Image (cartoon, rainbow, N blue to C red):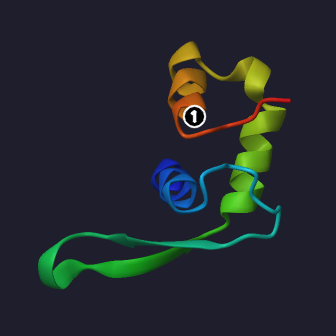
Amino acid sequence: MHYAAAAQFFAREGHLTVPRKHIETITTGDGQAQRDVALKLGTWVDNQRRRAGTLTPERVELLSKVGMRWA
């Protein structure tokens, strides 16, 4: 879900420089089962950057596609 929030933020803002305390709300589900979910995107992005050395190459590539800055 956090990746979807990161992609949504990137599509809207054009970057992934997310303030640490930023909360991103995404809509999950479909039809009548839709609900809004608030995610601590800023914390998650910061954690991904800090753990860059332990992420799989696939994860790094996926995050790079939505504008992740690693340094």
Q: Quadrant of the C terminus?
A: top right
Return the x and y of residue 66 as percentages of the image width and height. Answer: 54, 40
Q: Position of residue 59 (x, y in %)?
A: 55, 26
Residue at 67% from the left image edge and 49% from the top image edge: 16
Outermost residue, left direction? 31
Q: Left or right: where does residue 35 sit relative to residue 4?
A: left
**Is residue 69 left or right of 55 when viewed as pictured?**
right
Q: From the viewer's perspective, is 2 left or right of 15?
A: left
- Seen in the picture, residue 4 relative to 33 is either above or below; the reply is above
- Identify the residue position indicated by label 1 in the image: 63
Near mark 1 (Cα within 10 A), the count class, few <14, some 14-19 or many ≥20, is many
Farthest residue, direction top: 57
Q: Is residue 50 left or right of residue 30?
A: right
Please provide percent x and percent y for residue 38: 55, 76
The foreground one among 55 and 65 is 65
Q: Residue at x 51, y 59 (%)?
A: 5
61 shown above or below 19: above
**55 or 69, which is in the foreground?**
69
At label 1, the amino acid type is Leu
Element type at marker 1? helix
The residue sitting at 49% across, 55% down in the picture is 11
